[in-house]
Amino acid sequence: MRSKPIDVILKLGTAMLLSLTMAPAFAQAPPPMTEANRAMQIAQARQANAALMHQYLWQSRVEIIKNGTVKDMRLEQVSYDPNGQLQHTTLNDQGGNKMYLPTPIGFLRRGIAEHEKEEMEKYLAGLKGMLEQYTLPTAGKILDFMTSAKPSGPDAQGLFQMSGNNVVLPGDNLTLWVNPWTQHVRRMTVTTTFQGDSVQLDATFATLPQTNLNYVSLAEATVASKQLSVQVQNYNYTHY
C-alpha cells in the first residue's frame, strides 16, 4: 500500500476530498436560524459524514496531465484501517514500468527527467497544502465565510449559491452550491493563486441514496500557466 498521489481538494478527495456535508433531509423547508447555528450544523454534519466514510471502501483514479500529456495515471482502492488512517492499494501495478516517488505524487512515468519529477513533486506538495486551507475545517472558519459570502438562488436545480472573496488569500474566491434540504454541498469552485500562478479548482459531489454518504465524485485542479492539471475521480463506494 502506498500513499495517494495527490490529495487535491480539496482535503477535497477524501477530505475537500472530506470537506463534505451530511445532514438528515427536512420534511419541509429548513427553518430560519442564525448563521452561527448554521455553521455549527454544517460542522456537525461533516463529522457525521466523516465517520460514515470510515465504513466504506472505494476506487480512485488520479491523473496528472502536463502539456496535454498524461504524465501519471493511477488506479487505487481506498479505505480506512482500524486506526482511522487512509490505506491505498494500487490496482494498476505494472512492476518496473513506473517510478515511485514520495507522497503526495506517488509515482510518475519513468520517461520523465529526474529534475522534472523533483520539481513537480515539490510544486504539487505546496499546491496541496495551499488548497487544503479552503476546506473551512472548523465551525469558526465556516462562520467567517458565511458572514462575508454573498448568497443567491435557488437556481434551476433548487441549489443555493454562496460566494466569497478574500477567503484565504487577497483576491481569491470560494463558491459553494448547496442543497438547502440536506445541507449537502453539490459543487464547489476555488479561484486562487500559488507561487504567482492562477489556480482553478472545481469539484462535483455525489450522494449515496442508501446511507446519505456525501463524497467528491470528480475534482480537477488546473494551473493554466504551467499547462498542468490534476484530476481525481472517486467511485464504486462499497459499504462493509
Image (spheres, grey):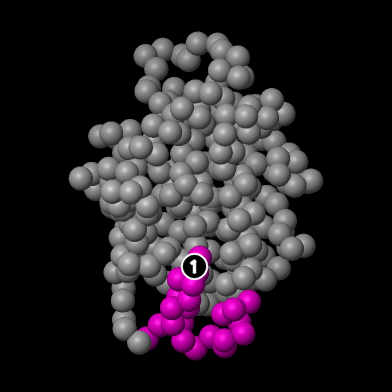
Instruction: Answer above or below: position of 102 versus 203.
Output: below
Q: How many marks?
A: 1
Q: Residue furthest left?
A: 240
Q: Is residue 106 visible?
A: yes
- Please name the residue that numbered disc 1 is placed on: 103
Classify the position of the N terminus by image quarter.
Answer: bottom left
Residue at screen point 50% across, 29% down:
43
Q: Residue furthest front?
A: 83
Q: Residues within 10 Å of mark 1 (few under 14, many from 20)?
A: some
Classify the position of the C terminus by image quarter.
Answer: top left
Which quadrant of the view contains residue 23?
top left
- Residue 221 lies, in percent from the top left, at 57, 58
Q: Amino acid at mark 1?
A: Thr
- Residue 183 lies, in percent from the top left, at 47, 27
Which quadrant of the view contains residue 116?
bottom right
Q: State the extent of the magenta-drawn residues as a range.
A: 97-119
Q: Is residue 67 visible?
A: no
Residue at screen point 46% across, 52% down:
13
Residue at screen point 57% across, 34% down:
138
Element under disc 1: loop
Q: Is 16 contained in the magenta span?
A: no
Instruction: Answer above or below: position of 70 versus 211.
Output: below
**Residue 169 left/right relative to 78:** right
**Residue 9 left/right relative to 174:** left
- Residue 209 lies, in percent from the top left, at 29, 34
Given residues 183 and 18, the one toward you in this image is 18
